[in-house]
Image (tube, coloured by chain):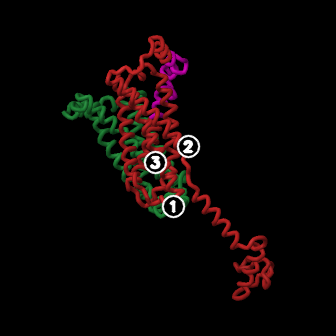
Chain colours: A green, B red
Amino acid sequence: MHAFALWVKSTDLSWMVTHYSWVWATCEVLHFIGMSILFGCIGALDLRMLGWWKSSPVAGVNALVRWGALGFGINVVTGLLFFVGEPLQYVDNPAFRFKMLFLGLAGWNVLLFYVTGVADQVESLEPHDDSPFSAKVFAATSLFLWTGVIFFGRMLPYLGGSF
Amino acid sequence: MEDGHLSLRGAPHASPWSNEPIAGDGLDQAIDETMRRYFMRHDPPALAYAKVLEATRRTSTTRYDGALHSWIIGASSAVAAMLLVNLVWQLLGVTAAQVSADTAARGALFLVWLTHTEFARWINESESVFGYSGILFLHTFGLAIVVGFSTAIDLRLLGAASRMSVTAIRPLFRYVWLGFCVNALSGAMLFAADAPRKAENPLFELKLALVAIGVAVMAVIQRRLLQAESDVSRRDSHSGFRVLAIASLLIWAAAIAAGRLLAYAF
């Protein structure tokens, strides 16, 4: 792992990310914007399935998920740039490992949501319809996991030594 | 009943205790009789329905006066204007109002006192997750809620997710304001922990101004959605929503940028 991190550190891209301070700062800004888009669009669907607001058909809110995916894409790119820039401050960081774990579980949750057919089940729900229990479990899990991703992302400098 | 046959209480041809099936005219009579017994006793249904309809129509057409939103919009616009004017003057080097050295010193002393209160010192020195790092997490979490749900609302106003009506998205505002309260509180704590340095940073002032404008824009959008909901004639006129949505997206992005760069500015 350390050999890999050292190799990443030796690349030109890594040099570029850390040499120009504006690259890191811009990526931080984009990472937070991407986080907001992702959390807002996925969270809106989760809250609809939990029944915390019901004025929209689920299919309508579901159309926001692709925008959430855009936010996720922004964060994958900027997140990779952080890792490439300073790999050594992440590989041993417990907060980073937890963040990746929660990220993986969140992805697994999304996959199960679509594979088990629950996504198709809720697609037909009209305004004010209550969703099935399974959908509520997926929604609550999703909110918990994404909040966890934000938590451990924020803890990167405090539990580990990154900046 | 055990046979699954229909039997209606009070029907002339079927006693509630008999298991005899009723059909045809007997069934019609049974239904009529039951309706009369249970629903027509005091009020003919037609009148009752008319009353309910009337009441429903009256509540759904009550015009929303928007008083609360006017206050929010006015207050946050005033705050934003003051901060921006001060900021521009500061950057131009204009001294608009000279405060006496005494007053300036009092102000500076207040900020120093604030960072040395027991609470602020605990925030700074606590190693626990409830200390500085936890408050910072709450601030980030609130940011994700405020900007995230605002983005969802803006995207709908810009034509995304068109299978839900524009006004159907309005309940999300509840969470936007909840997130804003989380961030106002956590932000005040973070400021207390580092008051003098934050106060002298123009980026901090810019961030506050941007947040105030963002709040004003969201309040304008919410008020217009409420008006569209309560006034059928306005339901299809969404002109202006597009401009508001784009403004909101840009302002929140700028606020995030100012806030994030604040961490690198010292």
Say which quadrant the N terminus of chain B sits in: bottom right
Q: Which residue is mark 1?
A: B232
Of residues A135 and B111, which is closer to you in this image?
A: B111
Overall secondary structure of the magenta section: helix
Q: Tell me the distance, in whole angstroms, between the alpha carbons under discs 2 and 1.
A: 22 Å
Chain letter of the residue carrying label 1: B
Toward the left, the furthest residue is: A12
Q: Position of residue B81 (x, y in %)?
A: 42, 33
Figure check: A60 above or below A95: below
Q: Which residue is mark 3?
A: B221
Q: Residue at x 55, y 59 (%)?
A: A128
According to the image, label 2 marks what residue? B68
Mark 3 or mark 1, earlier in chain: 3
Q: Is residue B42 left or right of residue B4?
A: right
**Residues shaded magenta:** B113-139
Give the structural element (helix, strand or loop) at label 1: helix
Q: Is residue A138 visible?
A: no
Q: Nearer the viewer, mark 3 or mark 1?
A: 1
Please tell me whether residue B95 belongs to the stretch shown in magenta.
no
Could you tell me residue B42's position as x and y percent? Answer: 78, 70
